[in-house]
Amino acid sequence: MATSAPAWAVLAVPALLAAFTVAAVAGDALLAARAGGRRPSVAAAAGPLAEVPRLLVAQRRTTLAPDTLLWRLGLVTVPAAAVLAALVIPFGGVTASRMSVGVVWFNAMEVLTWAGLWLAGWGPNSALSLVGGYRFVAQGLAYELPLMLALIAAAAGAQSLDVARIAAAQAHYLWFAVWMPAALAVYLAGVYAFSFLGPFGSPAGRDLAGGVLAELSGVDRLMVAAGRWLLLTAGAGMAVPLFLGGGAGPVLPAWAWSAVKTLAVLGLLVWARRRLPLVRADRYAELAWVVLIPVTIAQTLAVALVVLKLGGPP
Amino acid sequence: MTAVVFGVLAPVAAVSGLLVFRFRSMARVTIALLVSFLASGGLLISLGLGYLGTVVILMMIIEMIIMMVFMIAYMMNPAGLIQMTMHHNQRGARAISVATFVLLSAGIFATPWPRRAGAAPPDPTFQLGKALMGPQMLTMITLGFTLFAAMVAAVVLATARGRYDRFGDDLKRRPPSDSAGGGVGR
């Protein structure tokens, strides 16, 4: 089913990721316009995108005694992590960089945001930024283990860490979303958490005057602001092979089904992000460790027992 | 290809490891160490050990960030902003490190390296899993229990509050009085 990709596919990944991200940001702007009582229009949808050229030419803010090296390193890491994570996501039948341990790679690249955001908070020598960076680390301690266990549940269901094989294991059988609902829910919460959007947006929260974004302007701000949406898109894209059958579907070709499913997950995440309250990292930590870790362990155990009994996914 | 990757990553790992002892800020020191570990993880991947290499990258990012938080918190100046150095006991350290380097290098040249027997397995990850869950099961169980016991012991030693502080002298107070509220309403 999955073929090894030509070399140009590696270049197509950032382009495709950016295209889906633009759609997500435009959709979010439309929802914001509706919520604000304005008419949802093309101009409203293009609003955030019109910011891009302004940010590209705007002057960088400088602070007193910043750690410039670490600051820049952290800022670059956020969008880079999203692109690196997206390399292993199969789109249709093609994976840009097929790895036998793709799930672990995705996890490792998503964890790069820990370093990226902490450094982005540390670099400018500003208290509000630093608090934002620490908030993300606290949030990371809470979301990471349940997310890992959710990924393990999908990998156990397909008996493989190769993302393309996980998708193929659902091609003619039940989607993993059907018999791993807890893993899917925890995974989607993890996507919000590592892209610090929606209920997990407190590292860049308004109560901190923007947190990690507080001291950022110009291209620096663009990298982190775009990076979090790229991360959200990469997370939505990964949900498709993990839980929604990858490119499998009737009539349409595989790439079209991948696109439709990615847009559906992305749409759900963008819509629900306005409906969910902000979750504080300290409160989520207890929920994650006391409730979500046992739930995801039970989910993985159930998956393992089913696979052992049936010799494969149902 | 492997030679090119090695030629890039090995110097990066060595130089950033050296930078750990050159930088004067705890944040930079930790990131230099992290870069060294990331390059080592990349080397493992280029050797065909995809799982081990990726797990090294994954674990080291988490570990270094958590370590950085604690190292900065425990530094003897506010927020770790005053310059520091990683050197201690310089003369002894130099003697130990030179001796270790000579010993290990001598070992590389003195060992009669075995020739490769058979071919590489198609999926080394599967092989690793079988070894861990088969012949090395006892090792892993012991390791797991030891680590878990160490964690519980460390938390018990570190926390100033016990159940009597939380639930009252007769252990009947509900909900318990906690300094920080939790997310599940306890």
Image: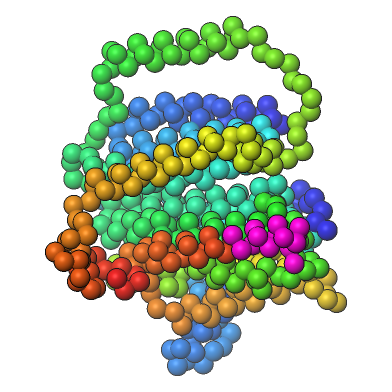
User: Is A119 drawn above or below residue A22 in the view shown?
Assistant: above
- What residue do we see at 59% from left, 60% from top? A300
Residue A134 occupies quadrant: bottom left
Of residue B119 and residue A62, the one placed in the foreground of this image is: B119
User: Is the N terminus of chain A in the top left, top right, bottom left or bottom right quadrant?
Assistant: bottom right
Of residue B1 and residue A101, the one placed in the foreground of this image is: A101
- What residue do we see at 65% from left, 60% from top? A305
Of residue B28 and residue A193, the one placed in the foreground of this image is: A193
Residue B136 occupies quadrant: top right
Which color scheme is applied? rainbow
Left or right side of A86 for A246: right
User: Is A133 drawn above or below residue A237 in the view shown?
Assistant: above
- What residue do we see at 54% from left, 76% from top? A270
Verify whether residue A307 appears in magenta. yes
Q: Which residue appears farthest toward the left when viewing the image?
A: B169
Q: Position of residue B138 (x, y in %)?
A: 54, 36
Q: Is the magenta stretch mostly helix, strand or loop?
A: helix
Q: How many labels does the image show?
A: 0
Q: Which residue appears farthest toward the right when viewing the image?
A: A251
Query: Does the image show residue A118?
Result: yes
Query: Does the image show residue B128?
Result: no
Q: Position of residue B51 (x, y in %)?
A: 62, 42
Magenta-tinted stretch: A301-314
Of residue A223 and residue A304, the one placed in the foreground of this image is: A304
Q: Where is residue B110 in the image (x, y as percent from the top left)?
A: 59, 6
User: Is the C terminus of chain A in the top left, top right, bottom left or bottom right quadrant?
Assistant: bottom right
Q: Position of residue A201 (x, y in %)?
A: 41, 69
